[in-house]
Image (cartoon, grey):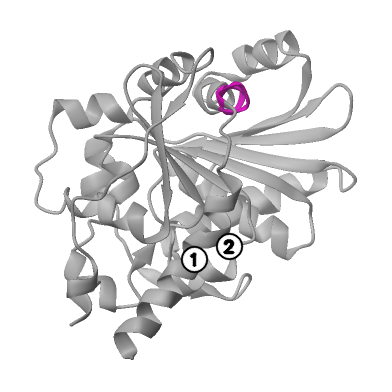
Amino acid sequence: MKRIMIYLFLGLLCYPAILQANTVDFTYIKKYAELANIVYSNAVEVDSFILKHGGKLIRYHTIPETQVSYFLSRDLDQKKQSISVRGTANLENVLVDLEFKLQQNKTVNIPLHQGFSEAAKAIYDDIIPHLNQNLTITITGHSLGGAIAVILAMYLDSAHYSVDSVITFGQPKVTNVAGAAAFKHLHLIRVVTTLDLVPVVPPFDPIEIKNTDIFWHLGTEIILLQGSYYSVTSGISSMLRAAKFFTQVPNEDNLENHKMQYYLELINAKLDNAIEEPYKNELEILSWFD
């Protein structure tokens, strides 16, 4: 009975996400991939990019304490505002320097990665005076910027701002099973590549699936395959995909798979003819509950 209850609970986490992923609009995803990419540039280049694409840059700022940069832009038709958070393309920093410690967050009342949540709170405090409460918000980011984007969405959602969606690229985990369940209503799309190790950080040991306090992803995961192909997964399937990296030593392929430019190349290949390929886990799950 315990085995069944745990399995059903974890399965429920991925049910809403699967419904959201019936059709993947790669033109929409490319828009936010470009925003996640241009935030690595300076304010002048960001302003030029936003203007060229029919928007207006409202604020570009670097948080002094964390040196995390972000920008807020607004569509000229005044229907939507977007936030992009800068991450890092340094795979070694992500895998080695990060201290993964979950700490109960009083603002959103769930456990969060301490470093990510502090960085997100600093952006939240800075951006509030510049947001239009009458417009929906879409948030994006790459790598650590994606993790901060998710938590920023949680802060804004808890403050009753209208968060339309969150689109992240190569995003590490930010919370545990309970935290993911509490915010499963967020429309989160996590775009990953097959060999990017950052989305599986911290590493996942399949034996730990019995432990509901482990780090856990929320949202729909879109796996960018070569050419026109992609797969969609979430919840348990997404976590089991990470299990094969448990003992892997990072290499140059992993670094290449994490670069934002590589993400854009794979997305561009799917704009005209995207073909979904069913995702298959190579691991057997039910035996782990015995």
Identify the residue under disc 1.
13
Q: Observer-nearest residue: 160 or 106?
A: 160
Task: Name which residue lies at 29% across and 50% down.
Answer: 200
Which span of residues is magenta-colored?
Answer: 26-32
On the rendered structure, is 233 left or right of 53? left
Residue 270: image x %, image y %?
47, 18
Q: Which mark is residue 288?
A: none
Residue 168: horizontal and vertical position, in percent?
Answer: 50, 39
Which residue is at a point 57% across and 41% down the rendered structure image?
22
| Residue 75 placement, left or right of 5 | right
Q: Amino acid at mark 2?
A: Lys
On screen, residue 148 above or below 284: above
Query: Which residue does the numbered mark 2 point to in the structure image?
Result: 184
* Mark 1 element type: helix
- Verify CB contact (< 8 Å) between mark 1 and mark 2: yes
- Give the amino acid at mark 1: Leu
